[in-house]
Amino acid sequence: PASTGLVATHPLALATVNSPPASVDGFVREFLRELNFGQGVSLQGSTVNDQYLALARTVRHYLMARWSETLRRQRETQAKGVAYLSAEYLLGRQLGNALLATDLTDIVGEGLAQCGIDLADLRAQEVEPGLGNGGLGRLAACFIDSLATMSVPCIGYGIRYEYGIFRQTFVEGRQVEQPDSWLALGAPWEFPHPENARLISFGGSVETTTDEAGVERRRWIPAWDVNAVPYNYMVPGYQNGRVNTLRLWRAQATDAFDLKIFNSGDYEEAVRAQTFAENISKVLYPEDSTPQGKELRLQQQYFFVAASIGDFLDQQLPEDFDLTKLPERIIFQLNDTHPVIGVPELMRVLVDERGLEWDAAWAITQKCFAYTCHTLLPEALEVWSVDLLGKLLPRHLEIIYRINDDFLAEVRERFGDDELRIRRMSIIAEHPERSVRMAYLATVAGSKVNGVAALHSQLLRDKVLPDFDEFYPGKFTNVTNGITPRRFLRLANPALSELITDAIGVGWLTDLERLRGLESYAEDEEFRERFRDVKAANKRRLDAVLRERDGFTVHDDHLLDVMVKRLHEYKRQSLKLLHIVTTYDRIISGEVAAADVTPRTFIFGAKAAPGYKMAKEIIHLINAVGSVVNADPRVEDRLKVIFPPNYNVTLAEKVIPAADLSEQISLAGKEASGTGNMKFALNGALTIGTDDGANVEIRELVGNDNFFLFGMLEPQVEELQTRGYVPSSFYEADAGLRRAIDLISSGAFSGGDRSVFEPVVSNLLYEDRFMVLADYAAYIEAQARVDAAYSDVEGWTRSAILNVARSGFFSSDRSMRDYIERIWGTPPSI
Ligand code: OAK
């Protein structure tokens, strides 16, 4: 931004930003000033929300000088950076992380105590920004944390949804969605900059014009536009003086848009038009991995990507910047296909607006993008109908056609007129509807394409994009996902963090491989006891949270068996359910005495996409089984099924540290990576899991003895599919399975009404797309191994400690190093 030309003479005005003193007194002064002059209340007259808002703003003050300095340095050095383009950021609460980054937790705790305030109460007041669905959005949040901590220049770009992922409630066991009004009580972490709004255009037509040099050029004449207003968020590195930026865009109606209609005297229409424009950033689509091809979603995608690319080119580069050098300055990382419309957008800007020749522009574009794929499910691969895309973005469709023509010409050159291959590889699909395959566009345009775990990257090359792998040797690579240890170990599990530091000293939080130093402590009896004490304390902490939140209890002498993730058939929550029903059936049928059953509490956390019928039926069934099992005196309280509604990052931070057993039971070949699996292992839970996603790497690292593997391997799944899978044959062949399914269909969990869960039962018996019944027996057998292992208290603890010690690889810091090395080539700047 241009300097205002201020000439300051006051000594305080000479610093870029004046940091408040990092002392208890300094903090209290600053906090009360915010309370009095920011919130306009006295301490005595303040509400908890006033106090929370004042505290958040006060903590912000401590980050401000670092932010300003980071921005200044970036402008000065023009070092190569990353622009992470993601439609989702599932950030979680900000306060604790900001306190950790500034090392102010103790000072603030003490200062607030002097004001009669408990820091924990203020932390609990924060509503997390749930601007994501699940894995993909949370990964983006972990990555920007790591980049800031590693001092890598990065700007995250996304959408400031007014409503994030819906708040889940249960009514008679069924999911009911409520709007997520995360902004209602104030948004102290954001910095809106309406003066930097950008105009984003849509619709209209394309015409040919002749420029001054007599060259014919295509020109887009849009029909309507909307303002993109940037909201900046700080992304603090961990105690390293760096603060990167997350820039989320909000849609606002343009005056011009209103006025045209306004002047026609149609007031209602003017208001409707404004609402229409502002709808673009109104709400996050709650579908995880199942895009619906809705126009508003394409509007969202283009809206944030065009704003971001425009912002980068116009605001982050010097005015006389030579665009052929763009790849030396930036890489746009595409978080799945949601931002892929950025490819034709950059081409449009370079060719139509900046006057570059097509080939020069394409050479730049191909170096400036890289694409990460996060799925293997065919239904998750985004396509946009040509009709819709052409209507909303006519010039972009033309550009996509040209990219495809050039690309297919290259394919023909290499392989001749192999028409089937051409059809297979075309960015434009002809069937069942003419549409743009966004993953193909990303693959053609991207300098690199990566999957998110070793197995996933392999399957991506072999099964999803084999023709492209053959065509572009060296383009495909893997970067296994990671998680930030700052949030998911240090903040979520302070007790374990302290135990670790006591044992191996500081330093592990930014160099997680140092956890290896804990291996020898697995053999230390006293350490094992302390480790168990930590787990038990975390269970009690969870118990307190869930009691207050939902009225559930968690016994600290139960094995805590946890499955938390989006509800999706491929993730197989119904397999977990069959295990619970089988165990219950064995008790009530008298096959085993309740007293001989390992006491277990099963925790589920899962949101279903509102339109995903089967997922919602399964949620209902979990709640129904819970109600019956929990209340049955024959169970003698040895089994408890609890399903707290509205699982989110905040709850994850309490659940994961308390868990003993981590359920990662997707059908092999379906879960791209998983990241929850890493969080559990890092917090000392053992995994029961299939050979899928990053489970493969977790097992390799923690060792077979410390992981409960079960189920078909991916090639076996393929083979069974080819042979013809008949789920009912497994039902017929396995008495335990039959009893479990019969118990459900008997109405035992639906007050005798056999029709209620009929859709779930029928689906399992006659369709079972994800082979739950085929893996049932292996799963039950693996759970028996879990019971046996858990009865050996010392052995279990040893395994749990080894899980922690060997999970350092799953730090998102390591993921970022891999991206830098294999994809970005960004040197960390100082
Ligand atoms: C969401 C929308 C479209 C495609 C994929 C997703 C998604 O969330 N995928 C998930 O990404 C995570 C992060 O890479 C992985 O750990 C999950 O396995 C994957 O399902």
Image: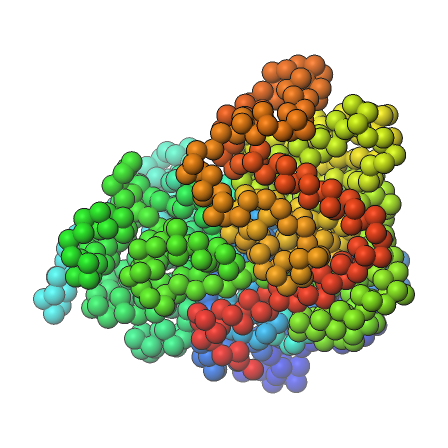
Q: Foreground residue, 329 or 817?
A: 817
Q: The C terminus is located in which quarter?
A: bottom right
Q: How many numbered marks, from 0 up?
A: 0
Q: Position of residue 624 (x, y in %)?
A: 70, 26
Q: Is residue 184 above or below residue 346?
A: above
Q: Position of residue 769 (x, y in %)?
A: 49, 34
Q: Position of residue 762 (x, y in %)?
A: 54, 23
Q: Is residue 656 above or below residue 524?
A: above
Is 653 displayed left or right of 764 in the figure?
right
Outermost left residue: 214
Quadrant of the rendered image containing residue 557: top right
Q: Position of residue 668 (x, y in %)?
A: 53, 47
Q: Is residue 506 above or below residue 628?
A: below
Q: Residue at x 35, y 44 (%)?
A: 383
Is 38 displayed left or right of 258 in the figure?
right
Q: Is residue 256 above or below residue 366?
A: above
- Taking the image as drawn, is residue 266 in sight? yes
Q: Residue at x 68, y 54 (%)?
A: 707
Q: Foreground residue, 418 or 230?
A: 418
Quadrant of the rendered image containing residue 754: top right
Q: Residue at x 61, y 83 (%)?
A: 14
Q: Foreground residue, 501 or 800?
A: 800
Outermost front residue: 733
- Taking the image as drawn, is residue 49 in sight? no
Q: Residue at x 59, y 28 (%)?
A: 733
